Image: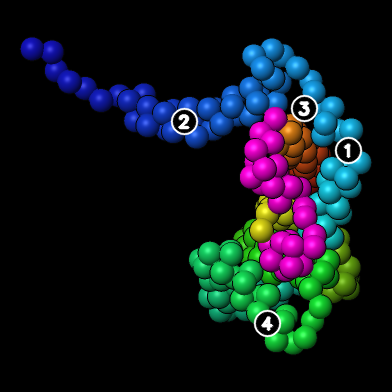
Amino acid sequence: MKKLTLSRKVFSYPYILFMLLFVVTPLVLILVNAFIVDGKIDFSNFVDYFGNPANMNVLTLSIEVGVITTLLCLLIGYPTAYLLSKMNAGKLLVLIFIMPMWVNFLLRTLATKTIFEALGVQLGIGTVIAGMVYNYLPMMILPLHTTISGIDKSYIEAAGDLGASPLRVFTRVVVPMSMTGIISGITMVFIPTISTFAISQLLSNSSIYLFGDSIQLKFDQGMYGVGSVMSIVMLVLVLLSNFIINKVSGRDNQNRSTLL
């Protein structure tokens, strides 16, 4: 009787099945809905989408909100992560920042909306961006704190011994050596922001629709072809963002290796 043996390849089968069902199959359906109309290859869905200026305005607004949210998260998150890295209880405080992420983002957004309404703040683009920053700020702080905490303190001490001021040490040593965390934080904030949905609707009383909201709306209206085209545009935008960020990250790592 042949002995049953388990190889490493066997343990990969569940992951392959999962990828086929929940990654490959949805992508295939999106491509089919986008390019095939009445059983024939047709580009009318692309014409319907790109021929409507309102659709492009939504895409532009989504990118603008993503850039603003990312910059605000970086401006708030970097000093916070830097200060936390200097504290003995920094890891515990980082955990406190991350704890809200354990709550469903819709519940967090509804709570944020209630706070704005209680304070008498008019809901609009400002509250949408504030809600985005609140939801995605922990994603910026976590990689920054990890990277800054891992910086070899001997470089900082050496710069100080050579006469560099604290500000110069920060700008010429700490910031360049934490660039990996900055890039990771930007990736974890910008990409989800431009593809998010529901947050903009809830925090603007449905007066502002971003790209993710528009995709959902198209599918709800039964416009699967146009919705699939928008999904492809979003996928291309995400891949392009990843490509640019990886290029910048690779160049930065090369410069750091040359410097060290």
Please give the name of the residue rendered at 37% of the width and 27% of the height, measured from the top-left corner. 13
Vertical placement of 160 versus 146: above or below? Answer: below
- Which class describes the residues within 10 Å of circle 3: few (<14), some (14-19), or many (20+)? many
Give the residue number, with chain letter if any, for mark 2.
21
Amino acid type, residue under disc 3 in the picture: Asn
Q: Do the residues labelled 4 and 2 touch (CB within 8 Å)?
A: no
Vertical placement of 21 versus 221: above or below? Answer: above
Give the residue number, with chain letter if any, for mark 3.
45
Q: How far apart are marks 3 and 1 (CA)?
A: 11 Å
Question: Residue 170 at what x, y percent from top left?
Answer: 82, 67
| Mark number displayed over residue 52 | 1
Compare marks 1 and 2 and give the one earlier in the sequence: 2
Give the residue number, with chain letter if any, for mark 4.
115
**Can residue 200 be seen from the camera position used here?**
yes
Marks 3 and 2: which is nearer the front? 3
Compare marks 4 and 3 and give the one earlier in the sequence: 3
Marks 1 and 4: which is nearer the front? 1
Question: Residue 136 at what x, y percent from top left?
Answer: 68, 62
Question: Residue 227 at what x, y percent from top left?
Answer: 70, 37
Amino acid type, residue under disc 1 in the picture: Asn
Please report the bounds of the magenta region as a residue range: 199-225
Q: Distance between the residues labelled 1 and 2?
A: 33 Å
The front one of 146 and 230 is 230
Q: How far apart are marks 3 and 2 (CA)?
A: 25 Å
**Can residue 91 be seen from the camera position used here?**
no
Amino acid type, residue under disc 2 in the picture: Leu
Q: How far apart are marks 1 and 4 (CA)?
A: 36 Å
Q: Does the magenta stretch include residue 209?
A: yes
The front one of 23 and 96 is 23
Q: Are marks 1 and 2 in contact (CB under 8 Å)?
A: no
Q: Distance between the residues labelled 4 and 3?
A: 41 Å
